Image (tube, rainbow, N blue to C red):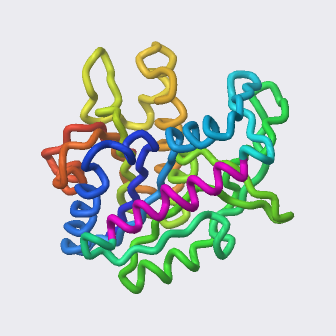
């Protein structure tokens, strides 16, 4: 059975009709014999929750700091509201789905992440290791795991984890065949156009030339690392209706495929 991991961007989750279409798309994947798991973000919902709390953002070296109060809000939003909205939509489309976070069964163990200058970012972390037992158990029994990236360290501290990084790490530990980043970005643009394919050896050159910039840099670097660790292909794409997932793995793909020769 081929494995597919889908990472859903936080802004995409709230797009009109998206969750229903995605659920139908995942149902089709399962009918075609794929094992599916989902990792999601929720940045827009987190921002709205912090706004309701009148919580101002603090940035350190250009990165958002997560204090204890913010971390409580992040966990409520990601592992609660957003996670269960996705699970509920999958269930409505006949997909057996289970919502978890990296905390559950120690699925993802985190470590504290410092800023680029070594400064404290509070409860911001990165995934250090993944325990696949629960994920394997769910997959082997036909369940789709819907994963919030919130994770803990060995001392029990809870951390806010970048969802792109979490998806890359978890996909690598699961040895998935396809890791798909679905967002409001149609793909990786090179020379003003979405590149159909990028070999991992080309990535540094595109970054050095300034063709790959901003938030796409950590996404594509994470894609490269996951491929080096065993993921066969990574797809970065937008959403084009309920046939998107199957089409992105075929010659009808409209996004970018990252691969290794």
* Residue 107 picture location, percent across and down: 63, 69
> Foreground residue, 23 or 190?
23
Q: Tell me which segment is drawn in magenta.
A: 71-90
Q: Is residue 261 visible?
A: no
Q: Quadrant of the C terminus?
A: top left
Q: Residue furthest bottom?
A: 141
Report the residue at 76% width, 31% height from top: 115
Q: Is 155 left or right of 29, judged from the image as shown? A: right
Residue toward you, 77 or 138? 77
Picture coordinates of residue 155 (x, y %)? 86, 64
Task: Tell me the chief SS of the magenta region.
Answer: helix
Question: Where residue 97 appears, x then y in whole percent?
Answer: 40, 74
Is-magenta flag for residue 72?
A: yes
Q: Residue furthest left?
A: 252
- Residue at image position (49%, 78%) is 136
Quarter occupied by the N terminus? bottom left
């Amino acid at each position: 059975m081929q494995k597919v991991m889908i990472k859903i961007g936080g802004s995409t989750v709230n797009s009109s009709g998206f969750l229903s279409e995605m659920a139908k798309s995942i149902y089709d994947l399962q009918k075609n014999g794929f094992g599916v798991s989902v990792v999601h973000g929720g940045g827009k919902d987190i921002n709205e929750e912090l706004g309701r709390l009148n919580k101002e953002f603090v940035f350190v070296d250009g990165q958002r700091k997560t204090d204890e109060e913010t971390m409580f809000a992040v966990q409520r939003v990601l592992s609660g509201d957003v996670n269960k909205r996705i699970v509920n939509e999958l269930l409505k489309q006949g997909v057996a789905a289970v919502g978890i976070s990296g905390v559950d069964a120690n699925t993802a163990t985190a470590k504290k992440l410092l800023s680029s200058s070594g400064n404290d970012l509070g409860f911001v972390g990165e995934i250090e290791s993944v325990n696949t037992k629960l994920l394997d158990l769910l997959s082997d029994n036909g369940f789709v795991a819907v994963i919030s990236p919130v994770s803990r360290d060995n001392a029990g501290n809870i951390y806010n984890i970048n969802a792109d990084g979490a998806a890359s790490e978890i996909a690598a530990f699961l040895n998935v065949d396809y890791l798909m980043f679905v967002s409001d970005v149609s793909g990786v643009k090179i020379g003003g156009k979405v590149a159909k394919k990028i070999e991992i050896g080309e990535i540094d050159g595109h970054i050095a030339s300034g063709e790959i910039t901003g938030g796409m840099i950590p996404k594509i670097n994470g894609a490269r690392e996951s491929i080096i660790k065993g993921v066969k292909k990574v797809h970065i794409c937008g959403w084009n209706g309920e046939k998107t997932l199957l089409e992105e793995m075929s010659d009808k793909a409209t996004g970018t495929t990252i691969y290794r020769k």
